[in-house]
Image (cartoon, rainbow, N blue to C red):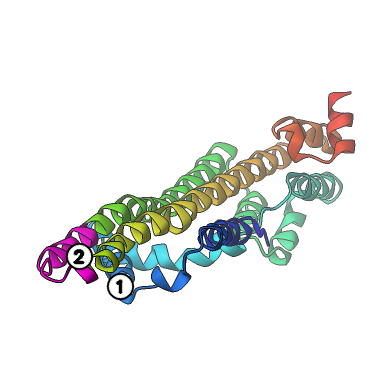
């Protein structure tokens, strides 16, 4: 589990809390139900209006991935592929059918099953590339949805402020209450900016990044599986796959041996 999103959001709200305390203000002054309900409710509503119900449901189902998304180390994938290449050279491609049954990765399982079934290399490449493209497109839907919420939220907050200021103008006859009313009016704008930059946009960026990492993993795995099918020598295959990965994503020993 990667805690980057949780740590980032907690630090962002912590920084806001620290500023409020240093300014001598009160947190309760910002926790007004009306603007919070408007900003959250209307932002999600217009996000739903701009897409489909399936997009809406799929996007919120993807939220846990932003917090629990696991980044598989590239070296771990390379080691798996090299082990499969060694098994294929010693026992034949049909032996990979047993490995397909043992793996929990659906993408690897389908690749191994197709190799064991004797699928043509070009057809297998097309199949795996199509699967990667389809998954990337599906992931992009959730990211775009939260990106849209990040764009709507500040405007919705301004709408809330305009409504509140209209109410203020209706009460000019009570000047003693104008100060608190005007301050409360700007809370909606604050929550619009807050939710956009502390919640929706980070979620969108995180989901897009997780999708990119997953696509990189699947691409690395695809190239490895195709090389296994072609009968590549395991050591050379490992070096080739390491060459496809940035040095900073590899252990120091592995990157040094690849450079040598």
Residue located beneath label 1 in the image: 37
Asked if the stretch drawn in magenta spans residue 36, the answer is no
Instruction: Select label 2 or label 1 by which is in front.
Output: 2
Q: Position of residue 221 (x, y in %)?
A: 66, 45
Residue 129 coordinates in the image, percent (x, y): 51, 42
Quarter containing the N terminus:
bottom right
Tell me what residue is drawn at x 78 percent, y 45 percent: 75
Give the residues in magenta: 159-176
10 Å neighbourhood of mark 1: few (<14), some, or many (≥20)?
few
Could you tell me which residue is drawn at 65 percent across and 38 percent down? 223
**Quarter containing the C terminus:** top right
Numbered marks: total: 2
Q: Is residue 157 left or right of residue 255?
A: left
- Residue reaching furthest top? 260
Q: Which residue is mark 2?
A: 164
Left or right placement of residue 132 versus residue 83 in this view: left
Secondary structure of residue under mark 1 = helix
Please name whichever residue, 110 or 240, is drawn nearer the observer in this view of the structure. 240
Instruction: Name the residue: 33% across, 52% down.
Output: 148
Q: CA distance from mark 2 to mark 1?
A: 14 Å
Name the spot of residue 50 as percent of width and height, x first.
23, 56
**Front-most of residues 174 and 239:** 174
């Amino acid at each position: 589990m990667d805690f980057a999103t949780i740590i980032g959001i907690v630090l962002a709200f912590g920084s806001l809390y620290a500023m409020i305390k240093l300014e001598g203000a009160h947190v309760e002054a910002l926790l007004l139900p009306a603007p919070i309900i408007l900003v959250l409710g209307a932002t999600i509503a217009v996000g739903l209006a701009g897409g489909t119900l399936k997009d809406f449901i799929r996007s919120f189902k993807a939220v846990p991935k932003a917090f629990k998304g696991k980044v598989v180390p590239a070296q771990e994938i390379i080691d798996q592929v090299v082990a499969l290449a060694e098994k294929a050279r010693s026992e034949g491609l049909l032996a990979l059918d047993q490995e397909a049954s043992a793996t929990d990765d659906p993408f690897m399982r389908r690749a191994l099953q197709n190799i064991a079934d004797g699928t043509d290399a070009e057809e297998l490449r097309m199949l795996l590339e199509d699967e990667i493209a389809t998954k990337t497109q599906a992931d992009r839907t959730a990211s775009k949805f939260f990106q849209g919420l990040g764009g709507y939220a500040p405007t919705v907050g301004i709408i809330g402020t305009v409504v509140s200021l209209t109410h203020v103008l209706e009460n000019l006859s009570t000047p003693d209450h104008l100060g608190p009313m005007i301050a409360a009016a700007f809370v909606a704008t604050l929550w619009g900016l807050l939710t956009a930059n502390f919640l929706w946009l980070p979620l969108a960026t995180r989901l897009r990044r997780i999708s990119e990492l997953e696509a990189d993993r699947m691409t690395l795995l695809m190239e490895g599986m195709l090389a296994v099918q072609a009968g590549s020598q395991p050591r050379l295959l490992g070096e080739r796959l390491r060459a496809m990965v940035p040095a900073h994503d590899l252990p120091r020993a592995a990157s040094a041996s690849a450079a040598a």
